[in-house]
Image (tube, grey):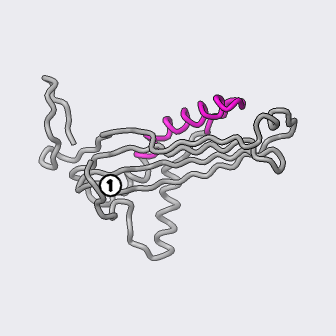
Amino acid sequence: MSEENTNGAVAPVDAANGPAFTVEKIYVKDVSFESPNAPSIFNDQVQPELQLNLNQQVQRLGENAFEVVLAVTLTCKAEDRTAYVAEVKQAGVFGLVGLDPQSIDVLLGTQCPNILFPYVRSLVSDLIQAGGFPPFFLQPINFEGLYAETLRQRQEQGEASSLANSEPVGNA
């Protein structure tokens, strides 16, 4: 991890400088668009049904680096026929230095997906429109509420695990 000095040089960020949360990289990890019933599906005059599946994965990359992947799958059906399926996995590498495990868990579960979501929203909309369908805009998602629900479920199951407790799997 690094931060830019006023002279433009890059200096390492360490715990001695105090707590730090940095966005190291944002990238598309996977993207897919399918329209299995095109072009005949364009003639259908039925109200489409949309199904949204949202998933988040966290992977520890090093002592202070985490990859967060926000995965969205949007399936549109017209009666019993699939109009399209758009799948996006938007990822980011985030640096978290000098923070306690609880704070890291909160940032990984709320702030990181909030940062990634606008990229997912844009990519999903572009894919659907490029597929010949009317634009679709994902509505805002309350990641704080989803995180609170995840904490409640962990407590019910007696789990003490957190998003930050995974083992390192590579370098960032």
Which contiguous range is marked in magenta? 112-138
For image coordinates 20% across by 38% down, the residue present is 2
Farthest residue to the top: give it. Answer: 7
In this rendering, the count of numbered labels is 1
Q: How far across and down, in percent of the image, does residue 143 sit?
A: 50, 49
Farthest residue to the bottom: give it. Answer: 158
* In the displayed structure image, the side of residue 75 where residue 57 appears, left or right: left
- 20 within the magenta span: no
Q: How far across and down, in percent of the image, does residue 72 sit?
A: 56, 47
Farthest residue to the right: give it. Answer: 45
Compared with 155, 70 (above or below) is above
For image coordinates 15% across by 46% down, the residue present is 14
For image coordinates 23% across by 50% down, the residue present is 97
- The residue where tag 1 is placed is 104
Dot 1 alpha-carbon crowd within 10 angstroms: few under 14, some 14 to 19, many 20 or more: many
Please state which amino acid type lies under the numbered disc 1.
Answer: Ile
* In the displayed structure image, the side of residue 147 where residue 5 appears, left or right: left
Residue 105 lies in what quarter of the image?
Answer: bottom left
Closer to the camera in the image, 75 or 150: 75
Q: How far across and down, in percent of the image, does residue 64 sit?
A: 24, 52
Closer to the camera in the image, 155 or 34: 34
Residue 32 lies in what quarter of the image?
Answer: top right
For image coordinates 13% across by 36% down, the residue present is 11
Closer to the camera in the image, 148 or 9: 9
Q: Main secondary structure of the magenta part?
A: helix
Image quarter of the N terminus: top left
Closer to the camera in the image, 35 or 129: 35
Q: How far across and down, in percent of the image, does residue 150 sit?
A: 50, 62
Residue 35 lies in what quarter of the image?
Answer: top right
Q: Secondary structure at mark 1?
A: helix
* In the displayed structure image, the side of residue 80 where residue 166 appears, left or right: left
